[in-house]
């Protein structure tokens, strides 16, 4: 069975600084996807970034980038130039690539990030 | 285009009462899901549906029932609510298509349910 572990329950960072959130996962499969979701105080789940396991290049979306280490089963999220609006709970999630079938999304427990002025 | 909507947003139930949570999506998605979110545990899948008229159990299905009579709606029912079902419930939807964009799940705003 696949599992996702986020070892940092809470983190804080000063505005404009960089912060890295950690995520490790366990799977014996080779084809899968990894995601980071953001949940601000509004509760809305927002997809931040996605990484395909078959891609060696790390995904980036503006100030958000990942460090994907497939052999180490590690998938960390780096937020550059942190903004007050980045304050949220961040969830790492794993999905097996089951072509033509149902793709189960497995979430980590989350990391609560606070950005301070 | 409203995306995924959930009704109600908040609800308080007494132990033993029943209720139905409604999820609606206007994106013509085939797949729909119900999750619950508890502190320190992330989101866990309760039930899911891969099309109109079909449902299947997820990770934590006990105490819940679901129905997907129309493609755009997915209902989650609690027949006899228990305090252990106090949680935030999220509905999500996705469509089977060309990877990888088809694997994104779109979430509703959540329903906070308290069972006393």
Image: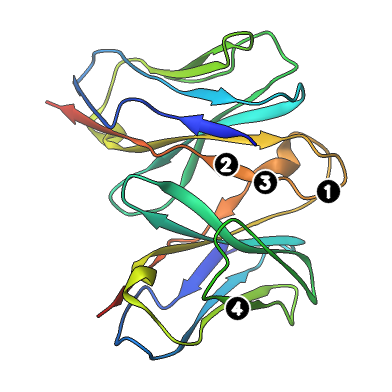
Left or right of B87 in this view: B78: right
- The CA distance from mark 4 to mark 2 is 21 Å
Callouts 2 and 3 close, C-beta under 8 Å:
yes
Q: Which residue is mark 3?
A: A104
Task: Tell me the CA gap for discs 4 and 3.
Answer: 19 Å
Task: Kindly check if marks 1 and 4 are in contact, taking CB atoms under 8 A apart as contact.
Answer: no
Count residues near mark 2 (Cα–Cα under 10 Å), then give few for <14, some for 14-19, many for 20+. many
Could you tell me which secondary element the residue under label 2 belongs to? strand
Q: Position of residue A49 (x, y in %)?
A: 54, 29
Chain of the residue displaying label 4: B
* Image mark 2: chain: A
**Dot 3 crowding, Cα within 10 Å, few <14, some 14–19, many 20+:** some
Q: Residues within 10 Å of mark 4 (few under 14, many from 20)?
A: some
Q: Position of residue B112 (x, y in %)?
A: 34, 68
To which quarter of the image does residue B83 belong?
bottom left
The chain letter for the residue carrying disc 1 is A
């Amino acid at each position: 069975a696949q599992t996702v572990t986020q070892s940092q329950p809470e983190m804080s960072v000063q505005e404009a600084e960089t912060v890295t959130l950690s995520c490790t996962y366990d799977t014996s499969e080779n084809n899968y996807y990894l995601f980071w979701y953001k949940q601000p105080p509004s509760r809305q789940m927002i997809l931040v970034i996605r990484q395909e396991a078959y891609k060696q290049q790390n995904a980036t979306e503006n100030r958000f980038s990942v460090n994907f280490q497939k052999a180490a089963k590690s998938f960390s999220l780096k937020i550059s130039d942190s903004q007050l609006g980045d304050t949220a709970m961040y969830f790492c999630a794993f999905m097996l690539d089951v072509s033509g079938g149902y793709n189960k999304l497995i979430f980590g427990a989350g990391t609560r990030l606070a950005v301070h002025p | 285009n409203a995306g995924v909507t959930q009704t109600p947003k908040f609800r308080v139930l007494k132990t033993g009462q029943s209720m139905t949570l409604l999820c609606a999506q206007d994106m013509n998605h085939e797949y729909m899901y119900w999750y619950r979110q508890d502190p320190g545990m992330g989101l866990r899948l309760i039930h899911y549906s891969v099309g109109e008229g079909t449902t299947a159990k997820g990770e934590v299905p006990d105490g819940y029932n679901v129905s997907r009579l129309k493609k755009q709606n997915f209902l989650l029912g609690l027949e006899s609510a228990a305090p252990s079902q106090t949680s935030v419930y999220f509905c999500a939807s996705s469509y089977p298509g060309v990877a990888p964009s088809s694997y994104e799940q779109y979430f509703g705003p959540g329903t906070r349910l308290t069972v006393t």
